[in-house]
Image (cartoon, rainbow, N blue to C red):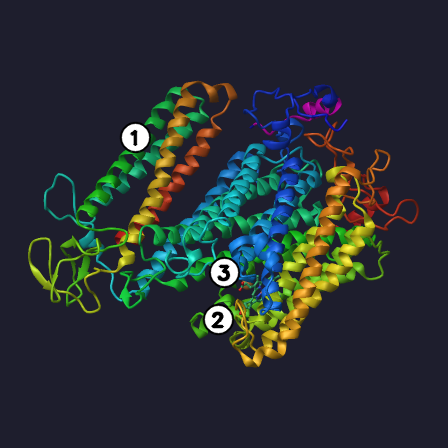
Amino acid sequence: MAEETLLKHADTHEHEGHEPFMPADEFESNSPMKVSYGKMMMWYFLLSDAFTFSAFLITYGALRVSNKWWPDPNHVFNAMPFMGHKQIPLGFVSIMTFILILSSVFVVLAVIEGHRMNKKGVLLWMLGGIAGGAAFLGCQAWEWSHLISEGLRPFFNPFVPDAQGMTHLAKSIVDPETGRRVLEMTGNMVTDAHGHKFQLGEGFGKFGGVGAFGALFFGITGFHGFHVFTGVLLNVWGFFATLSGKFEKVGHYEMIEKLGLYWHFVDLVWVFVFLAFYLL
Amino acid sequence: MAEVISKEHLAHDVHHAPHEEHHHVETFINKYIFTTDHKMIARQFLFTGIFWAIIGGLFSVLFRVQLGWPDATFPVLEKLFGNWFNDGKLDPNAYYMLVTMHGTIMVFFVLTAGLSGTFANFLIPLQIGARDMASGFINMLSYWFFFLSSLVMFASLFVPTGAASGGWTIYPPLSALPQATPGSGTGMTLWLISMALFIGSTLMGGLNYITTVLNLRTRGMDLFKMPLTVWALFFTAIIGLLSFPVLLSGAVLLIFDRSLGTSFFLSDIYIGGKALGYSGGSPILFQHLFWFLGHPEVYIVILPAMGMVSEILATHSRKPIFGYKAMIFSILGITILGFIVWAHHMFMSGLNPFAGSVFTLFTLLIAVPSAVKVFNWLTTLWRGNIHLNSASLFAIGFVSVFISGGVTGIWLGNATIDIQLHDTYFVVAHFHIVMGIAAFFGMFAGVYHWFPKMFGRFMNETMGYIHFFVTFLGSYVIFWPMHYLGMSGVPRRYYSFKEFAAFSQYDDLNKVISAAAIVVFITQLVFVANFIYSIYKGRKMTSDNLNPWNSNTLEWTTPVEPGHGNWPGALPTVYRWPYDYSKNTTGPDFTPQTVPLTEQEIKELESHA
Ligand code: HEM
Ligand SMILES: [Cu+2]
């Protein structure tokens, strides 16, 4: 008797895979919010993920206000690919942001086509979303490698103040004795990227500017980038699942909606990251 | 959408449901190991939890031996535990490791995973009338993440330099600088990996618990007809979902500090006169991130126990729970307030005094919903027809220890008093009584009460009585005197007090505490023996008495050992709240949730409306 299993046939076409026990088996959903359980789970996951990001951003805020000096974002983020040494403060990151928002729009369109059960439309716009995400990641890779080439590391920050508190990018070298990255210094004079010498602001030494700056930058944009990366993978999966007719068979494109929720979330988080690192 | 199904379909379904059953191919692997059946997953959590409880308890015995008899040597222990003991004496580094692992194991692995993992899985679907969790697959993953996390933590015990030893709160710099102490190296790395997996597990579990409660309730099971267990487990899941991610962030940043040399939690630090090159970070920040989880965590631990105790007290005193809605709203109050009191753990960490007064205010406020619950339990018991058995004894014991431990919380919550008491044995006494013992009592009550439903047999009552009385008295003997130690300033987390002449007056007291700890530990083994024995040899539950406690809730309407899907036929329909005890003037003194309202009751309801 005990061994009896009461698994029921997944006999209606609404069922997906291995989830045999939907309330729809037997009666109307009792959900006070009239949302399917899959979407509800996604919402709660995002809520919880929002707390993870909030903790990171609060960490950012706390460290930033508790330090007497912080590098000026207009100075740190002013490079643009293919433009040589021309300085365009926040130019590149604006393009990145635009790309990400655009890709979110594409995914919205994919969801709309899903409601219309238009497989071709879903495929087209999903492709757009994927391309946008991939482009964003490419931009991020460029920005990271550029900053790394300038000497920024999670544990070392070459952006230092001069005696007036203005931000300069200082030359750094790897100390042959300790193997650690340090500023190239003579007395308290350092050299900037153009070879000009300037006097280091008070409280700073050969270990460079506020160490937490690089840590926060790589840590938080990296964590966000990881989310984008996961999102692109998920969307690629969604694309191929659509292509194979999986959702057409199931009768709805709810999975695309769930992917869309995740994707908009990643986009929204970026707005806050952008605000914290680049605008403030 | 998919959920909307016509009434015709419904009727059809009810009539034909039994014919639609079919036998699924069952193998050992998919029944006992990679199972998606919530009842089996619950048992997996329970067994793993019991395993960890034994380890965690054993560790406390080991360090209590050191505290009770700091001068004696125990060659046996050296034989058993190798280099944790040198010349028969506990090594100081091993002492810190044992204390740290004891805390970690008990708080996270036993009282979080073992307690809510077990009972949320077991009770939510059975008590709301669902066939399983919303996603059986994610539920299964939740257990296996916990299992992996357990493996990693267990492995860390065998690392030559020892497991993590900076305290269960893993404050930097001890946790951030691998070179700080032996345990700060590999042991700490494994601790962080294990906790990251653990957080994954609670997250997946929590997602399921929340969606299941909201989406899969059976016909008639309105939110305000749910048993208090389900309410408590529901809010527990919400707290976990919102607080564990913050610990995850802290852990990730800590991992960066350790492995990439970043400076999130480290500022200018000198070791041996040499500067380390960290700058701009803040160790206090970590404390904020930790306690933003840490305080809600104590409610994650206690709420499921509270829910079960409410249910068990009502059932075994044959009375409706007093203040059902008040209970729910006090859980809600605790949930909300629990998120804004964390800094009461940091009064002595350099907190701004103004912030201190704000946190004192909120902390004292949270005592209000806690007190509401206590009064409701007492009123439920008051003049009840109390059936004493292992389950109800532990539930009553819970109320006792929760009061004793909660009162000292109000002392500690006052920043000015806490200046004296922080980091003394007073705090140890407070949280062990209010959290440690109380949550364990809730868990024991739950195991004794639902054992027949879990395993189809009863536990032995005599052994249960011995277990209860020795544990109850023993726990007070262990922890009550610690208040006095703490008030005279004995600090916690010290390896030995031999250097402090003033504390020598407590040498004998420490021996008493240690002796009681050993007795209580052995008594827990009686429980474990009873548990295992009863699974195989206990008195059987028979199909003519499916409801041994004459309880109103839905789980007792299932067969002796429900299969995957819980109810063989259609799902039960619910008509009333679960606490109609001693309402009838004739006949049985309980009215299960599945009994339709009488005309009389309907009239009463209408006259209220
Ligand atoms: C009546 C409400 C309560 C109040 C006002 C309260 C207050 C406090 C305060 C102020 C502290 C910090 C003491 C210090 O470190 O100096 C503390 C510690 C603690 N409390 Fe409570 N508490 C209450 C209830 C609880 C409950 C219900 C639990 C668990 C179920 C709990 C678990 C803990 C734990 C685990 C610690 C110590 C953590 C550590 O430092 O290792 N408390 N409590
Ligand atoms: Cu607290």
Asked if the stretch drawn in magenta spans residue B10, the answer is: yes
* Up-down relation of residue B278 to residue B315 (above or below): below
Q: Residue at x 40, y 42 (%)?
A: A265
Which chain does tag 1 point to?
Answer: A
Q: Is mark 3 within 8 Å of ligand 1?
A: yes
The quadrant in which the N terminus of chain B is found is top right
- Disc 3 marks a residue whose amino acid type is Gly
* Left or right relative to B331: residue A58: left
Q: Residues within 10 Å of mark 3 (few under 14, many from 20)?
A: some
Q: Is mark 1 within 8 Å of ligand 2?
A: no
- Disc 1 marks a residue whose amino acid type is Ala
Image-quadrant location for residue A267: top left
Q: Which SS type dominates the magenta stretch? A: helix
The numbered disc on residue A131 is: 1
* Left or right relative to B75: residue B560: right
Q: Is mark 2 within 8 Å of ligand 1?
A: yes
The numbered disc on residue B167 is: 3
* Up-down relation of residue B479 to residue A92 (above or below): below
Q: Which residues are magenta?
A: B2-15
Percent x, y for residue B295?
53, 59
Which chain does tag 2 point to?
Answer: B
**Disc 1 secondary structure class:** helix
The lab-note entry on whether marks 2 and 3 share a chain reads: yes
Q: Residue at x 42, y 54 (%)?
A: B250
- Marks 2/1: CA distance? 51 Å
> Which mark lies nearer to you, 2 or 1?
2
Which chain does tag 3 point to?
Answer: B
The numbered disc on residue B347 is: 2
